[in-house]
Image (cartoon, rainbow, N blue to C red):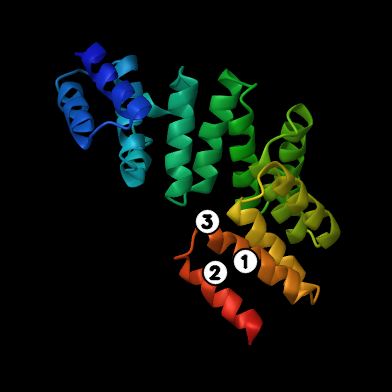
Amino acid sequence: LESRANAYLNYYEKFEGEKQSLDSTKWYLSQLRSTEMSIDLWVHLLYLNQEWQKISALISKEDYAAEKLKDAWTSYRIGQGLQNDGRFEEALTYFNRSLAIAPGNLEWKNKKGVLLIQLGRIGEGAQLLKESLALQPKQAEPWVNLGFASLQEGNQVYALACYNKALQLDPDLAQALLNRAAIYHMQGKDKEASQDLKQILLKDPNNTDVKNLLMTLKN
């Protein structure tokens, strides 16, 4: 049963399968007693279903305590579920566990960096992002997040440099364009800000928020 459930999950995740695959997984898992593998599969299922509150509810159970988890992906998925449910402190415990098992995962380092920034621990978050970028500088999103952290610390010049770096790697990255436009506007450079907003609309012409911002700049 576990192998069948795992097969359905892998099919859905790798090939963007139909919702029926997840329903089949849920049925197979419901027939199992709690084991290490079924715990991992349950979390994976809830993660793919984006059922963040159900993931949050799991951590009250002893089997789902961070220190008992042996699979790095399970720890990460619980952490992501908790973060998406607004439970940042608890999410940090699970991100720490995932990185204790797989310390070389840069994506998870970046996620933890963002979480620390959300917790108001901006210096720690920025430092973690810098460590990740030192290992692999060609990551666009961490540059965006580092720029945001720098702006929170009042370093507008470095924030702009971070956004520029992100856009060198991914010229159409919407969050980088939006954040850079905000800095340009603060600097009185509305022409440059408008150009960034228009670039976002080239890829996402129905983005109402960006359209409204563009209209505000024109007025």
Q: In this view, does 132 lie above or below 143?
A: above
Seen as rendered, the residue at the extreme bottom is 219
Side (left or right) of 104 relative to 26: right
Spot occupied by residue 40 in the image (x, y as percentages of width and height) = 36, 22
Residue at 17% across, 27% down:
24
Which residue position holds label 1?
197
Residue 183 x/y as whole percent = 75, 66
Q: Are marks 3 and 1 in contact (CB under 8 Å)?
A: no
Q: Name the residue under label 3.
A: 203
Callout 1 amino acid:
Leu
**What residue would you read off at disc 2?**
210
Spatial separation of the CA atoms under disc 2 and disc 1: 6 Å
Task: Say what secondary structure mark 1 lies in.
Answer: helix
- x, y (%) of residue 180? 71, 61
Q: Which amino acid type is shown beneath numbered disc 2?
A: Val
Residue type at mark 3? Answer: Lys
| Residue at figure coordinates x 61%, y 55% from the top left | 175
Q: How far apart are marks 3 and 1 (CA)?
A: 11 Å
Q: What element carries label 3?
A: helix
The 10 Å Cα crowd at callout 1, few under 14, some 14 to 19, many 20 or more, is: many
For residue 18, above or below residue 166: above
